[in-house]
Amino acid sequence: MRTIAIAALALVAAPSLALAAAPAGPVAPPALAGLAADPELEGKVQVAITQQRLEAGASLAEHRQPYIRHLFVASGQLKVSNLVTGEEQLVGAGEMATEAAGDWHMAKAVGDEPVEIYVIDQLPATDAAATVGGL
């Protein structure tokens, strides 16, 4: 597992990214350069990205985090379930899902191939004790 801490707010614009049809092979995470950051949050938010692999058919345990979390699927298909609202989302290569802060979630690799994901945590810059990437 590799963690990259980024002391910028580049990912606040991530939900507005338009995603094309899922490509056939692995996909690189979205580029952070050129994304507009919210000036009101400048220096107040830290973004941490963790790369993880989930084997075909494997599930992540129920979890929740106190901050917004984005999941970028680089390859495979991931089913993300919000255990509070009952909402389920199938996320393929090149697509993103967002987990709400405080809600319980779980995820499962669906299909015959492993899932490569980038877990993107958005947390206050002052919260040095926050756990990032822990699913």
Image (cartoon, rainbow, N blue to C red):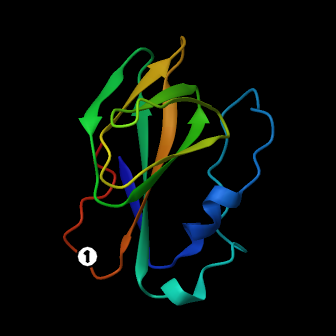
Q: Find residue 76 and report its image quarter.
A: top right
Residue lying at 75% horizontally and 26% vertically, measured from the top left: 24
The image shows residue 46, relative to residue 65, as above or below, that is below
Query: Residue 35 appears at what percent x and percent y?
Result: 69, 72
Residue 84 vs residue 74, the one in the foreground: 84
Query: Residue 36 appears at what percent x and percent y?
Result: 68, 77
Q: Is residue 21 left or right of residue 71?
A: right
Residue lying at 24% horizontally and 59% vertically, measured from the top left: 131
Instruction: Looking at this view, name the residue that lies furthest to the front.
Output: 85
Q: Find residue 93 and report its image quarter.
A: top right
Quarter in which the C terminus is drawn: top left
Instruction: Looking at this view, name the residue that lies furthest to the right.
Output: 20
- Label 1: which secondary element: loop
Q: Find residue 16 and report its image quarter.
A: bottom right
The image shows residue 21, relative to residue 128, as above or below, that is above
Q: Disc 1 designates what residue?
A: 127
Residue lying at 36% horizontally and 19% vertically, measured from the top left: 58
The image shows residue 126, relative to residue 77, as above or below, that is below
Instruction: Looking at this view, name the residue that lies furthest to the top.
Output: 112
Q: Is residue 22 left or right of residue 66?
A: right
Query: Residue 34 appears at what percent x and percent y?
Result: 73, 74
Query: Residue 29 appears at what percent x and percent y?
Result: 62, 51
Residue lying at 23% horizontally and 75% vertically, measured from the top left: 128
Residue type for callout 1: Asp
Q: Is residue 33 left or right of residue 88?
A: right
